[in-house]
Image: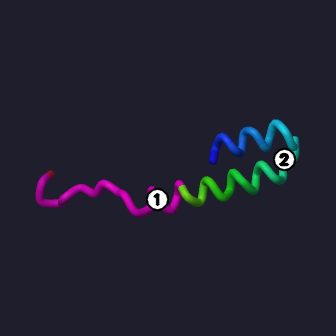
């Protein structure tokens, strides 16, 4: 998807389109990273 964003940015030259694509990609990143977290076990400090 990042490759497609780069191609579109180069070929279309439309910043609004590129930002919309980037927003969609970043939402995927945030959703995934919100699920996988490392937490400290209070009993093992």
| Residue nearest the viewer, comparing 31 with 6 | 6
Dot 2 or dot 1: first in sequence order is 2
Where residue 45 appears, as percent x and y from the top left, is: 15, 51
Residue 28 in the figure: left or right of residue 38: right
Instruction: Please name the residue that numbered disc 2 is placed on.
Output: 15
Image marks 2 and 1: residues in contact by CB distance under 8 Å: no
Residue 40 in the figure: left or right of residue 14: left
Kind of element beneath mark 2 = helix
Dot 2: within a 10 Å radius of its alpha carbon, few (fewer than 14), some, or many (20 or more) residues? few
Where residue 21 appears, as percent x and y from the top left, is: 72, 53
Boundaries of the magenta span: 29-44
Instruction: Please name the residue that numbered disc 1 is placed on.
Output: 32
| Residue nearest the viewer, comparing 26 with 11 | 11
Please name the residue shown 81% across and 53% down the image. Answer: 17
| Residue nearest the viewer, comparing 31 with 40 | 31
Kind of element beneath mark 1 = helix
Magenta span contains residue 15: no
């Amino acid at each position: 998807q990042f490759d497609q964003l780069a191609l579109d940015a180069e070929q279309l030259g439309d910043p609004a389109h590129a930002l919309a694509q980037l927003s969609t990609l970043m939402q995927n990143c945030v959703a995934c990273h919100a699920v996988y977290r490392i937490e400290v076990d209070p009993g093992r400090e």
